[in-house]
Structure formats: C-alpha cells, structure tokens
Image (tube, rainbow, N blue to C red):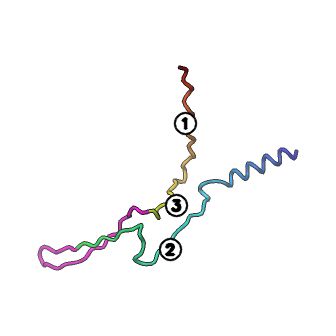
C-alpha cells in the first residue's frame, strides 16, 4: 500500500510541473527606456488645409530581453513529444 501511495504522490508532483504554471519574468521598464519596443513618429500633412500632425506608433523590436517575455501558449494546446529516432541503418 505504501508503494501505491508513493506512486500517486509522484504522479501529483509530475502534474505540478506543468509548463503553463511557470511564473513569468516581467521587466518593469522606465518610461522611454524599453528596448523591446521601438517608437516611430511620422508627420502627416492634410492635403486641403496643410495642417501637420504627428502620429506615434510603437512596434516590437528585436532584443535580447525578448527572452524574458513568457511564450504565448494556447489554452487547448497539448504537449507534443519529439518524433522517435530513425531505425538503425545496416551497412
């Protein structure tokens, strides 16, 4: 009976190691210092009136710090095991 209880405890421990439960490492960036986002400013001129307005747009930027952002895992995604190794070749 003790062996069965140990096996059940091990199964529960394995279930706890779910990748969905990993806490993320969110970096709190100071305003204007986030290197993972690039701010693009464009000037737009109105054809008729000639007024100019500035449009600001933020786009993702390639950075080492993107490593720390948690990956997006869909709710219904299943873990996929790697394919089995190919059979040995006989020469």
Residue beneath label 2, please?
28
Q: Is residue 68 left or right of residue 50?
A: right
Up-down relation of residue 55 to residue 8 (above or below): below
Q: Calculate the distance from the C-alpha at mark 3 to the C-alpha at mark 2.
A: 14 Å
Q: Residues within 10 Å of mark 3 (few under 14, many from 20)?
A: few
Q: Residue furthest front?
A: 91
Residue at 52 percent of width and 54 percent of height: 73
Give the magenta range: 43-63
Residue at 56 percent of width and 64 percent of height: 24
Q: Secondary structure at mark 2?
A: loop
In the rendered picture of this protein, how many numbered marks are placed on residues?
3
Labels 1 and 2: the sequence-earlier one: 2
Q: Residue furthest right?
A: 1
Q: Are marks 1 and 2 in contact (CB under 8 Å)?
A: no
In the rendered structure, find residue 70 and report the number of the disc placed on it. Answer: 3
Q: Secondary structure at mark 3?
A: loop
Q: Calculate the distance from the C-alpha at mark 1 to the C-alpha at mark 2.
A: 39 Å
Residue beneath label 1, please?
83
Residue at 55 percent of width and 36 percent of height: 83
């Amino acid at each position: 009976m003790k062996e069965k209880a140990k096996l059940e405890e091990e199964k529960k421990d394995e279930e706890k190691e779910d990748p969905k439960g990993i806490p993320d490492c969110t970096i709190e960036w100071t305003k204007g210092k986030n290197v993972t986002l690039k701010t693009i400013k464009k000037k737009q001129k109105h054809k008729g009136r000639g007024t100019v307005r500035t449009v600001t747009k933020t786009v993702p930027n390639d950075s080492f710090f993107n490593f720390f952002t948690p990956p997006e895992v869909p709710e219904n995604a299943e873990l996929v095991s790697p394919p089995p190794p190919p059979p040995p070749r006989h020469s």
